[in-house]
Amino acid sequence: MKLFKSFAIAAIAATTLYNCSSSTGVVSTPVENIDTLPLKTSELTETEKQHWAHLDLKKDTIPGMSVDKAYDEIIKNRKGATTIVAVIDSGIDIDHEDLQGAIWKNPKEIPGNGKDDDNNGYIDDVYGWNFLGDAYNEQLEYVRLLASGNTAHPRYAEAKAERQSEYDKYVGIKSNYEQFLQQIKNADDALKRETKKENYTQEDVNAITTNNQTLQQYVAVAKYVYSLEFDSLKDAIKELSDGLVDITERLNYNLNVDFKGRTTGDNPDDLTQKYYGNNNVKPIKASESHGTHVAGIIAAVRNNGKGGNGVANNVKIMSIRAVPNGDEYDKDVALAIRYAADNGAKVINTSFGKYYSPHSDWVRDAIVYAASKDVLIVNAAGNEGTDLDIKNVYPNDAVGTGPEVADNFISVGSLDPKYGSGLVSGFSNYGKINVDIFAPGGDIYSTFPDNTYKSIGGTSMASPGVAGIAALIRSQYPKLSAPQVKKIIMDSGLALTTKVIVGGDPSNVKPFGALSKSQKIANAYNALLLAAEVAKNL
Protein backbone atom coordinates (compact mmCIF):
# COMPACT_ATOMS: atom_id res chain seq x y z
CA MET A 1 0.00 0.00 0.00
CA LYS A 2 2.66 2.51 -0.89
CA LEU A 3 1.53 6.10 -1.15
CA PHE A 4 3.35 8.73 -3.17
CA LYS A 5 3.41 11.64 -0.77
CA SER A 6 3.81 15.07 -2.34
CA PHE A 7 3.21 14.53 -6.02
CA ALA A 8 -0.25 13.20 -6.90
CA ILE A 9 0.47 10.53 -9.52
CA ALA A 10 -2.71 11.19 -11.44
CA ALA A 11 -2.00 14.90 -11.64
CA ILE A 12 1.55 14.43 -12.91
CA ALA A 13 0.41 11.78 -15.36
CA ALA A 14 -2.26 14.09 -16.76
CA THR A 15 -0.34 17.31 -17.22
CA THR A 16 3.01 18.73 -18.26
CA LEU A 17 4.54 21.71 -16.57
CA TYR A 18 4.13 24.21 -19.35
CA ASN A 19 0.47 23.39 -19.66
CA CYS A 20 0.82 24.55 -16.52
CA SER A 21 -7.93 5.94 5.47
CA SER A 22 -24.00 -5.78 20.62
CA SER A 23 -23.71 -2.71 22.79
CA THR A 24 -22.56 -2.33 26.37
CA GLY A 25 -25.13 0.41 26.70
CA VAL A 26 -22.41 2.94 27.51
CA VAL A 27 -21.08 5.44 25.02
CA SER A 28 -18.61 7.93 26.43
CA THR A 29 -18.68 11.23 24.51
CA PRO A 30 -17.48 14.01 26.80
CA VAL A 31 -16.96 16.37 23.86
CA GLU A 32 -20.32 18.07 23.39
CA ASN A 33 -21.68 19.48 20.12
CA ILE A 34 -18.60 18.25 18.31
CA ASP A 35 -19.99 19.09 14.88
CA THR A 36 -20.38 22.76 15.80
CA LEU A 37 -16.72 23.31 16.67
CA PRO A 38 -15.03 26.07 14.66
CA LEU A 39 -12.84 24.92 11.79
CA LYS A 40 -9.09 25.41 12.15
CA THR A 41 -8.17 27.72 9.30
CA SER A 42 -4.56 28.50 10.20
CA GLU A 43 -1.68 26.35 8.99
CA LEU A 44 -0.44 23.76 11.45
CA THR A 45 2.79 24.66 13.19
CA GLU A 46 5.75 22.34 12.75
CA THR A 47 5.13 20.96 16.25
CA GLU A 48 1.46 20.36 15.45
CA LYS A 49 2.37 18.62 12.18
CA GLN A 50 4.62 16.20 14.05
CA HIS A 51 2.17 15.61 16.89
CA TRP A 52 -1.32 16.20 15.51
CA ALA A 53 -2.51 12.59 15.90
CA HIS A 54 -2.23 12.96 19.70
CA LEU A 55 -4.14 16.25 19.97
CA ASP A 56 -7.74 16.83 21.05
CA LEU A 57 -10.50 17.93 18.70
CA LYS A 58 -12.26 20.18 21.19
CA LYS A 59 -9.14 21.83 22.60
CA ASP A 60 -7.05 22.05 19.44
CA THR A 61 -9.71 21.86 16.67
CA ILE A 62 -7.46 19.16 15.18
CA PRO A 63 -9.01 15.67 14.84
CA GLY A 64 -6.45 13.74 16.86
CA MET A 65 -7.05 10.85 19.25
CA SER A 66 -6.80 12.83 22.53
CA VAL A 67 -3.71 10.83 23.53
CA ASP A 68 -2.10 13.74 25.38
CA LYS A 69 -5.33 14.31 27.29
CA ALA A 70 -5.47 10.60 28.20
CA TYR A 71 -1.98 10.74 29.70
CA ASP A 72 -2.49 14.11 31.42
CA GLU A 73 -5.83 13.27 33.03
CA ILE A 74 -6.08 9.46 33.29
CA ILE A 75 -2.83 7.56 32.93
CA LYS A 76 -0.46 10.12 34.47
CA ASN A 77 2.39 8.00 35.89
CA ARG A 78 0.56 4.65 35.85
CA LYS A 79 2.53 2.20 33.72
CA GLY A 80 0.12 -0.72 33.78
CA ALA A 81 0.96 -4.23 32.62
CA THR A 82 3.50 -4.72 29.86
CA THR A 83 1.64 -5.49 26.63
CA ILE A 84 3.14 -7.26 23.62
CA VAL A 85 2.12 -5.87 20.24
CA ALA A 86 3.13 -7.85 17.17
CA VAL A 87 3.83 -5.77 14.07
CA ILE A 88 3.48 -7.93 10.97
CA ASP A 89 5.16 -5.78 8.35
CA SER A 90 8.45 -5.19 6.58
CA GLY A 91 11.59 -5.30 8.68
CA ILE A 92 11.82 -3.15 11.82
CA ASP A 93 14.95 -1.30 12.86
CA ILE A 94 15.00 -2.76 16.37
CA ASP A 95 18.18 -0.77 17.11
CA HIS A 96 16.48 2.60 16.54
CA GLU A 97 17.22 5.13 19.30
CA ASP A 98 13.53 5.87 19.88
CA LEU A 99 12.51 2.21 20.17
CA GLN A 100 15.04 1.22 22.83
CA GLY A 101 13.24 -0.47 25.71
CA ALA A 102 10.18 -1.06 23.53
CA ILE A 103 11.36 -4.15 21.62
CA TRP A 104 10.11 -7.62 22.59
CA LYS A 105 12.71 -10.23 23.41
CA ASN A 106 11.77 -13.90 23.55
CA PRO A 107 12.44 -14.94 27.16
CA LYS A 108 12.62 -18.62 26.22
CA GLU A 109 15.26 -18.25 23.52
CA ILE A 110 19.05 -18.10 24.06
CA PRO A 111 20.46 -15.69 21.46
CA GLY A 112 22.94 -16.96 18.91
CA ASN A 113 23.25 -20.58 19.98
CA GLY A 114 21.72 -21.93 16.78
CA LYS A 115 19.13 -23.94 18.71
CA ASP A 116 15.36 -23.87 18.98
CA ASP A 117 15.38 -23.40 22.75
CA ASP A 118 11.63 -22.91 23.12
CA ASN A 119 10.79 -25.76 20.70
CA ASN A 120 8.43 -23.64 18.61
CA GLY A 121 10.08 -24.59 15.33
CA TYR A 122 11.89 -21.28 14.82
CA ILE A 123 15.60 -21.25 15.63
CA ASP A 124 16.95 -18.22 17.55
CA ASP A 125 13.72 -16.27 17.18
CA VAL A 126 14.89 -13.74 19.75
CA TYR A 127 12.97 -10.67 18.49
CA GLY A 128 10.39 -12.35 16.29
CA TRP A 129 10.62 -14.06 12.91
CA ASN A 130 11.32 -13.26 9.26
CA PHE A 131 9.08 -15.27 6.93
CA LEU A 132 10.58 -13.57 3.86
CA GLY A 133 14.17 -14.67 4.37
CA ASP A 134 16.46 -12.57 2.19
CA ALA A 135 13.71 -11.54 -0.25
CA TYR A 136 12.63 -7.93 -0.75
CA ASN A 137 10.82 -7.41 -4.08
CA GLU A 138 7.73 -9.43 -5.01
CA GLN A 139 4.97 -9.59 -7.60
CA LEU A 140 1.46 -8.39 -6.95
CA GLU A 141 -0.99 -11.22 -6.29
CA TYR A 142 -2.85 -10.89 -9.58
CA VAL A 143 0.48 -10.98 -11.43
CA ARG A 144 1.23 -14.26 -9.65
CA LEU A 145 -2.09 -15.53 -10.95
CA LEU A 146 -1.05 -14.67 -14.51
CA ALA A 147 2.36 -16.26 -13.95
CA SER A 148 0.66 -19.49 -12.89
CA GLY A 149 -0.87 -19.80 -16.35
CA ASN A 150 -4.16 -20.96 -14.83
CA THR A 151 -6.49 -19.56 -17.48
CA ALA A 152 -9.41 -21.46 -15.92
CA HIS A 153 -9.22 -19.33 -12.78
CA PRO A 154 -12.45 -17.26 -12.51
CA ARG A 155 -10.44 -14.02 -12.12
CA TYR A 156 -7.77 -14.73 -14.74
CA ALA A 157 -9.25 -12.45 -17.40
CA GLU A 158 -9.80 -9.71 -14.81
CA ALA A 159 -6.21 -10.04 -13.62
CA LYS A 160 -4.87 -9.89 -17.17
CA ALA A 161 -6.79 -6.72 -17.97
CA GLU A 162 -5.78 -5.10 -14.67
CA ARG A 163 -2.13 -5.92 -15.13
CA GLN A 164 -2.08 -4.45 -18.63
CA SER A 165 -3.87 -1.32 -17.49
CA GLU A 166 -1.52 -0.82 -14.54
CA TYR A 167 1.58 -1.52 -16.61
CA ASP A 168 0.60 1.01 -19.26
CA LYS A 169 -0.27 3.56 -16.58
CA TYR A 170 3.07 3.27 -14.82
CA VAL A 171 5.01 3.43 -18.07
CA GLY A 172 3.28 6.75 -18.72
CA ILE A 173 3.86 7.98 -15.19
CA LYS A 174 7.54 7.04 -15.38
CA SER A 175 7.95 9.04 -18.57
CA ASN A 176 6.28 12.10 -17.05
CA TYR A 177 8.33 11.83 -13.86
CA GLU A 178 11.52 11.67 -15.90
CA GLN A 179 10.54 14.70 -18.00
CA PHE A 180 9.46 16.74 -15.00
CA LEU A 181 12.58 15.78 -13.05
CA GLN A 182 14.81 16.91 -15.92
CA GLN A 183 12.96 20.23 -16.14
CA ILE A 184 13.48 20.85 -12.45
CA LYS A 185 17.16 19.89 -12.62
CA ASN A 186 17.71 22.26 -15.54
CA ALA A 187 15.88 25.06 -13.72
CA ASP A 188 17.86 24.42 -10.53
CA ASP A 189 21.18 24.66 -12.37
CA ALA A 190 20.14 27.86 -14.15
CA LEU A 191 18.86 29.54 -10.99
CA LYS A 192 22.06 28.71 -9.13
CA ARG A 193 23.99 30.47 -11.87
CA GLU A 194 21.60 33.43 -11.98
CA THR A 195 21.48 33.99 -8.21
CA LYS A 196 25.11 32.96 -7.68
CA LYS A 197 23.86 30.89 -4.72
CA GLU A 198 23.99 27.17 -4.14
CA ASN A 199 20.96 27.39 -1.82
CA TYR A 200 18.84 30.20 -3.26
CA THR A 201 15.45 30.97 -1.70
CA GLN A 202 11.95 31.49 -3.05
CA GLU A 203 12.43 35.21 -2.43
CA ASP A 204 15.55 35.11 -4.60
CA VAL A 205 13.57 33.53 -7.42
CA ASN A 206 10.70 36.02 -7.08
CA ALA A 207 13.17 38.89 -7.35
CA ILE A 208 14.48 37.77 -10.76
CA THR A 209 13.50 40.05 -13.64
CA THR A 210 14.64 39.12 -17.12
CA ASN A 211 13.71 39.28 -20.79
CA ASN A 212 15.43 35.96 -21.44
CA GLN A 213 12.62 33.56 -22.32
CA THR A 214 14.58 30.47 -21.26
CA LEU A 215 15.29 31.96 -17.85
CA GLN A 216 11.62 33.01 -17.58
CA GLN A 217 10.67 29.37 -18.14
CA TYR A 218 13.06 28.25 -15.39
CA VAL A 219 11.55 30.82 -13.00
CA ALA A 220 8.08 29.46 -13.90
CA VAL A 221 9.29 25.93 -13.16
CA ALA A 222 10.54 27.04 -9.73
CA LYS A 223 7.32 28.86 -8.88
CA TYR A 224 5.30 25.80 -9.87
CA VAL A 225 7.44 23.62 -7.61
CA TYR A 226 6.99 26.06 -4.72
CA SER A 227 3.22 25.92 -5.32
CA LEU A 228 3.44 22.18 -4.59
CA GLU A 229 4.59 23.13 -1.07
CA PHE A 230 8.24 22.25 -1.52
CA ASP A 231 10.74 24.47 0.26
CA SER A 232 13.29 24.10 -2.52
CA LEU A 233 13.87 22.59 -5.92
CA LYS A 234 16.43 20.31 -4.26
CA ASP A 235 13.64 18.79 -2.12
CA ALA A 236 11.48 18.30 -5.21
CA ILE A 237 14.35 16.61 -7.05
CA LYS A 238 14.78 14.15 -4.17
CA GLU A 239 11.04 13.45 -3.96
CA LEU A 240 10.77 12.81 -7.69
CA SER A 241 13.93 10.70 -7.73
CA ASP A 242 12.57 8.56 -4.88
CA GLY A 243 9.27 8.30 -6.73
CA LEU A 244 11.06 7.11 -9.86
CA VAL A 245 12.70 4.34 -7.84
CA ASP A 246 9.27 3.19 -6.62
CA ILE A 247 7.79 3.37 -10.12
CA THR A 248 10.69 1.45 -11.63
CA GLU A 249 10.34 -1.25 -8.95
CA ARG A 250 6.63 -1.39 -9.72
CA LEU A 251 7.35 -2.11 -13.38
CA ASN A 252 10.38 -4.37 -12.95
CA TYR A 253 9.10 -6.47 -10.05
CA ASN A 254 5.50 -5.95 -8.89
CA LEU A 255 4.02 -6.04 -12.43
CA ASN A 256 6.60 -8.33 -14.05
CA VAL A 257 5.02 -11.71 -14.86
CA ASP A 258 8.46 -13.33 -15.24
CA PHE A 259 9.95 -12.11 -11.95
CA LYS A 260 10.48 -14.65 -9.16
CA GLY A 261 11.13 -13.06 -5.78
CA ARG A 262 10.70 -15.83 -3.24
CA THR A 263 13.95 -17.22 -1.82
CA THR A 264 12.83 -19.28 1.19
CA GLY A 265 12.64 -22.64 -0.61
CA ASP A 266 9.14 -23.50 0.62
CA ASN A 267 5.98 -23.91 -1.43
CA PRO A 268 3.76 -20.87 -0.71
CA ASP A 269 0.73 -22.99 -1.65
CA ASP A 270 1.51 -25.62 1.01
CA LEU A 271 0.57 -24.54 4.52
CA THR A 272 2.11 -27.66 6.06
CA GLN A 273 5.59 -26.29 5.27
CA LYS A 274 5.79 -23.91 8.24
CA TYR A 275 9.41 -23.55 9.26
CA TYR A 276 11.22 -21.39 6.73
CA GLY A 277 12.80 -17.95 6.65
CA ASN A 278 15.22 -16.74 9.33
CA ASN A 279 15.49 -14.74 12.55
CA ASN A 280 16.66 -11.44 10.98
CA VAL A 281 13.72 -9.11 11.65
CA LYS A 282 15.55 -5.94 10.55
CA PRO A 283 15.19 -4.18 7.17
CA ILE A 284 17.48 -5.68 4.55
CA LYS A 285 17.86 -2.41 2.58
CA ALA A 286 17.64 1.29 3.40
CA SER A 287 14.30 1.82 1.64
CA GLU A 288 12.57 -0.84 3.76
CA SER A 289 11.16 1.68 6.22
CA HIS A 290 7.45 0.88 6.55
CA GLY A 291 7.66 -1.48 9.53
CA THR A 292 9.90 0.88 11.49
CA HIS A 293 7.48 3.76 10.94
CA VAL A 294 4.51 1.65 12.07
CA ALA A 295 6.36 0.44 15.17
CA GLY A 296 7.19 4.00 16.19
CA ILE A 297 3.56 5.13 15.97
CA ILE A 298 2.68 2.45 18.51
CA ALA A 299 5.71 2.38 20.76
CA ALA A 300 8.28 5.18 20.29
CA VAL A 301 9.54 5.85 23.80
CA ARG A 302 7.55 8.70 25.30
CA ASN A 303 9.14 11.94 26.49
CA ASN A 304 12.74 10.88 25.91
CA GLY A 305 13.61 14.00 23.92
CA LYS A 306 13.95 12.03 20.70
CA GLY A 307 11.60 11.95 17.71
CA GLY A 308 7.93 11.66 18.67
CA ASN A 309 5.88 9.82 21.26
CA GLY A 310 4.27 6.46 20.69
CA VAL A 311 0.64 6.01 21.70
CA ALA A 312 1.39 3.23 24.20
CA ASN A 313 3.71 3.67 27.17
CA ASN A 314 4.36 0.12 28.35
CA VAL A 315 4.56 -1.96 25.23
CA LYS A 316 6.97 -4.42 23.63
CA ILE A 317 7.03 -4.68 19.83
CA MET A 318 7.32 -8.20 18.43
CA SER A 319 8.75 -7.87 14.93
CA ILE A 320 7.46 -10.26 12.26
CA ARG A 321 8.77 -9.63 8.76
CA ALA A 322 6.20 -10.90 6.27
CA VAL A 323 5.44 -7.95 3.95
CA PRO A 324 7.70 -7.54 0.89
CA ASN A 325 7.91 -4.73 -1.63
CA GLY A 326 4.89 -6.16 -3.44
CA ASP A 327 2.01 -8.30 -2.24
CA GLU A 328 2.40 -10.48 0.83
CA TYR A 329 1.74 -14.23 0.57
CA ASP A 330 -1.36 -15.53 2.38
CA LYS A 331 0.70 -18.33 3.87
CA ASP A 332 3.20 -15.90 5.42
CA VAL A 333 0.40 -13.78 6.88
CA ALA A 334 -1.46 -16.78 8.31
CA LEU A 335 1.69 -18.19 9.93
CA ALA A 336 2.74 -14.74 11.19
CA ILE A 337 -0.60 -14.29 12.95
CA ARG A 338 -0.28 -17.74 14.52
CA TYR A 339 3.32 -17.05 15.56
CA ALA A 340 2.27 -13.81 17.28
CA ALA A 341 -0.64 -15.47 19.06
CA ASP A 342 1.52 -18.39 20.22
CA ASN A 343 4.25 -16.15 21.57
CA GLY A 344 2.26 -13.82 23.80
CA ALA A 345 1.08 -10.95 21.64
CA LYS A 346 -2.17 -9.39 22.86
CA VAL A 347 -2.48 -7.00 19.89
CA ILE A 348 -1.41 -7.54 16.27
CA ASN A 349 -1.07 -4.70 13.78
CA THR A 350 -1.48 -5.56 10.08
CA SER A 351 -0.77 -2.48 7.95
CA PHE A 352 -0.94 -4.13 4.54
CA GLY A 353 -3.49 -5.46 2.10
CA LYS A 354 -4.36 -6.64 -1.41
CA TYR A 355 -7.41 -7.34 -3.59
CA TYR A 356 -6.61 -10.88 -4.74
CA SER A 357 -6.08 -13.62 -2.15
CA PRO A 358 -5.88 -17.27 -3.31
CA HIS A 359 -5.74 -18.61 0.25
CA SER A 360 -7.82 -16.06 2.13
CA ASP A 361 -9.36 -18.95 4.10
CA TRP A 362 -5.93 -19.66 5.64
CA VAL A 363 -5.80 -16.10 6.94
CA ARG A 364 -9.37 -16.18 8.24
CA ASP A 365 -8.56 -19.44 10.05
CA ALA A 366 -5.56 -17.69 11.60
CA ILE A 367 -7.79 -14.81 12.71
CA VAL A 368 -10.06 -17.33 14.43
CA TYR A 369 -6.99 -18.94 16.01
CA ALA A 370 -5.86 -15.55 17.32
CA ALA A 371 -9.34 -15.02 18.75
CA SER A 372 -9.00 -18.33 20.62
CA LYS A 373 -5.83 -16.89 22.18
CA ASP A 374 -7.61 -13.61 23.06
CA VAL A 375 -5.60 -11.54 20.57
CA LEU A 376 -6.95 -8.35 18.97
CA ILE A 377 -5.99 -7.66 15.33
CA VAL A 378 -5.95 -4.06 14.06
CA ASN A 379 -5.85 -3.73 10.28
CA ALA A 380 -5.36 -0.93 7.76
CA ALA A 381 -8.42 -0.47 5.50
CA GLY A 382 -6.36 0.38 2.41
CA ASN A 383 -5.42 3.38 0.28
CA GLU A 384 -7.46 3.22 -2.91
CA GLY A 385 -10.30 5.53 -1.86
CA THR A 386 -12.84 2.80 -2.50
CA ASP A 387 -15.92 1.33 -0.80
CA LEU A 388 -14.94 -1.98 0.80
CA ASP A 389 -18.58 -3.04 1.03
CA ILE A 390 -18.41 -3.34 -2.75
CA LYS A 391 -14.79 -4.36 -3.35
CA ASN A 392 -13.13 -7.12 -1.29
CA VAL A 393 -9.80 -6.41 0.38
CA TYR A 394 -7.57 -8.89 2.19
CA PRO A 395 -6.87 -9.70 4.98
CA ASN A 396 -10.37 -9.51 6.39
CA ASP A 397 -12.55 -11.33 8.88
CA ALA A 398 -15.47 -12.00 6.55
CA VAL A 399 -16.32 -13.10 3.05
CA GLY A 400 -17.61 -9.95 1.40
CA THR A 401 -20.25 -8.39 3.61
CA GLY A 402 -21.06 -11.72 5.23
CA PRO A 403 -20.77 -12.57 8.92
CA GLU A 404 -17.46 -12.06 10.71
CA VAL A 405 -15.57 -15.24 11.54
CA ALA A 406 -14.53 -13.81 14.92
CA ASP A 407 -14.97 -10.67 17.00
CA ASN A 408 -11.31 -9.69 17.28
CA PHE A 409 -10.59 -7.74 14.07
CA ILE A 410 -10.76 -3.95 13.61
CA SER A 411 -10.44 -2.28 10.20
CA VAL A 412 -9.25 1.34 10.31
CA GLY A 413 -9.69 4.19 7.82
CA SER A 414 -7.56 7.34 7.71
CA LEU A 415 -8.11 10.97 8.71
CA ASP A 416 -6.25 14.13 7.75
CA PRO A 417 -5.63 17.00 10.20
CA LYS A 418 -8.47 18.98 8.59
CA TYR A 419 -11.62 19.02 10.69
CA GLY A 420 -14.50 19.68 8.30
CA SER A 421 -15.21 18.44 4.78
CA GLY A 422 -11.57 17.45 4.24
CA LEU A 423 -11.47 15.26 7.33
CA VAL A 424 -11.18 11.90 5.54
CA SER A 425 -7.89 11.28 3.74
CA GLY A 426 -8.45 11.27 0.00
CA PHE A 427 -6.71 7.91 -0.32
CA SER A 428 -8.64 6.16 2.48
CA ASN A 429 -10.92 3.22 1.83
CA TYR A 430 -14.25 3.18 3.66
CA GLY A 431 -17.31 1.00 4.17
CA LYS A 432 -20.33 1.00 6.44
CA ILE A 433 -19.90 -2.75 7.00
CA ASN A 434 -16.23 -3.50 6.40
CA VAL A 435 -14.50 -0.48 7.98
CA ASP A 436 -14.92 -0.17 11.73
CA ILE A 437 -13.49 3.22 12.68
CA PHE A 438 -11.28 6.09 11.50
CA ALA A 439 -8.06 7.44 13.00
CA PRO A 440 -5.26 9.87 12.06
CA GLY A 441 -3.27 8.60 9.09
CA GLY A 442 -2.35 11.63 6.99
CA ASP A 443 1.30 12.70 7.26
CA ILE A 444 2.13 10.99 10.53
CA TYR A 445 5.58 11.67 11.99
CA SER A 446 7.39 8.60 13.23
CA THR A 447 10.58 6.57 13.27
CA PHE A 448 12.54 5.67 10.13
CA PRO A 449 15.56 3.36 9.94
CA ASP A 450 19.01 4.50 11.08
CA ASN A 451 17.79 6.83 13.83
CA THR A 452 15.89 9.08 11.43
CA TYR A 453 12.29 10.33 11.39
CA LYS A 454 9.82 11.18 8.67
CA SER A 455 6.17 12.04 8.05
CA ILE A 456 4.29 9.72 5.69
CA GLY A 457 0.62 8.98 5.20
CA GLY A 458 -1.69 6.02 4.67
CA THR A 459 -4.21 3.85 6.45
CA SER A 460 -1.00 2.00 7.36
CA MET A 461 -0.39 4.88 9.77
CA ALA A 462 -3.98 5.01 11.07
CA SER A 463 -4.03 1.34 12.05
CA PRO A 464 -1.07 1.48 14.50
CA GLY A 465 -2.66 4.51 16.17
CA VAL A 466 -5.65 2.34 17.05
CA ALA A 467 -3.35 -0.58 17.90
CA GLY A 468 -1.67 1.78 20.36
CA ILE A 469 -5.01 2.60 21.98
CA ALA A 470 -5.77 -1.12 22.21
CA ALA A 471 -2.39 -1.69 23.88
CA LEU A 472 -3.11 1.12 26.35
CA ILE A 473 -6.43 -0.45 27.30
CA ARG A 474 -4.97 -3.93 27.63
CA SER A 475 -2.12 -2.52 29.71
CA GLN A 476 -4.33 -0.56 32.11
CA TYR A 477 -7.16 -3.11 32.22
CA PRO A 478 -5.56 -6.51 31.42
CA LYS A 479 -8.68 -8.49 32.37
CA LEU A 480 -10.63 -7.09 29.44
CA SER A 481 -10.95 -9.51 26.52
CA ALA A 482 -10.07 -8.78 22.91
CA PRO A 483 -13.76 -8.46 21.88
CA GLN A 484 -14.36 -6.11 24.81
CA VAL A 485 -11.41 -3.95 23.81
CA LYS A 486 -12.63 -3.83 20.23
CA LYS A 487 -16.10 -2.81 21.36
CA ILE A 488 -14.74 -0.17 23.75
CA ILE A 489 -12.69 1.43 20.97
CA MET A 490 -15.68 1.52 18.64
CA ASP A 491 -18.23 2.67 21.23
CA SER A 492 -16.03 5.36 22.74
CA GLY A 493 -14.99 7.19 19.59
CA LEU A 494 -16.24 10.64 18.66
CA ALA A 495 -19.38 10.42 16.54
CA LEU A 496 -19.56 13.01 13.75
CA THR A 497 -22.42 13.88 11.45
CA THR A 498 -20.51 16.31 9.26
CA LYS A 499 -20.43 15.69 5.52
CA VAL A 500 -17.01 14.87 4.08
CA ILE A 501 -15.33 14.48 0.72
CA VAL A 502 -14.76 10.80 -0.06
CA GLY A 503 -12.03 9.29 -2.20
CA GLY A 504 -10.47 12.69 -2.81
CA ASP A 505 -13.32 13.54 -5.21
CA PRO A 506 -14.96 16.90 -4.33
CA SER A 507 -18.14 15.78 -6.11
CA ASN A 508 -18.39 12.69 -3.88
CA VAL A 509 -19.69 13.98 -0.54
CA LYS A 510 -21.15 11.67 2.11
CA PRO A 511 -22.08 11.93 5.79
CA PHE A 512 -19.08 10.83 7.85
CA GLY A 513 -21.34 8.37 9.67
CA ALA A 514 -21.94 6.47 6.42
CA LEU A 515 -18.26 5.54 6.06
CA SER A 516 -17.77 3.08 8.92
CA LYS A 517 -19.60 0.72 11.22
CA SER A 518 -18.96 2.81 14.34
CA GLN A 519 -19.53 6.15 12.56
CA LYS A 520 -16.70 7.49 14.75
CA ILE A 521 -13.10 8.56 15.04
CA ALA A 522 -10.93 6.74 17.58
CA ASN A 523 -10.31 8.53 20.89
CA ALA A 524 -7.85 7.29 23.52
CA TYR A 525 -9.25 9.44 26.35
CA ASN A 526 -12.82 8.25 25.86
CA ALA A 527 -11.68 4.65 25.39
CA LEU A 528 -9.92 4.61 28.75
CA LEU A 529 -12.95 6.15 30.47
CA LEU A 530 -15.22 3.49 29.01
CA ALA A 531 -12.70 0.72 29.72
CA ALA A 532 -12.72 1.72 33.39
CA GLU A 533 -16.52 1.43 33.48
CA VAL A 534 -16.55 -1.96 31.76
CA ALA A 535 -13.73 -3.28 33.96
CA LYS A 536 -15.72 -2.42 37.12
CA ASN A 537 -18.34 -4.97 36.14
CA LEU A 538 -15.95 -7.88 35.60
Image: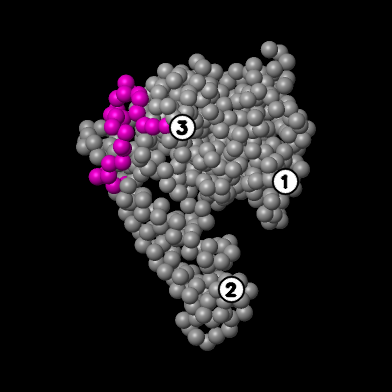
| Category of crowding for the residue at label 2, using alpha-carbon neighbours closer than 10 angstroms: few (below 14), some (14–19), many (at least 20) | some
Left or right of 529? Residue 404 is left
Q: Which quarter of the rendered picture does the N terminus lie within?
A: top left
Residue 115 lies, in percent from the top left, at 40, 23
Q: Nearer the viewer, residue 170 or 200?
A: 200
* Mark sitting earlier along the chain (2/1): 1
Q: Residue type at mark 2?
A: Tyr
- Give 512 or 206, whichever is nearer the viewer: 206
Residue on which disc 1 sits: 61
User: Is disc 3 in contact with disc 1, using a CB cutoff of under 8 Å?
Assistant: no
Q: Give the Cα distance between marks 2 and 3.
A: 45 Å
Q: Residue 275 colored magenta?
A: yes
Q: In the image, which disc is placed on residue 359?
A: none
Residue 293 drawn above or below residue 15: above
| Of callouts 2 and 3, the N-terminal one | 2
Residue on which disc 3 sits = 320
In what element is the residue under mark 1? loop
Query: Is residue 399 among what the camera can see?
Result: no
- Which residue: 47% across, 28% down? 111
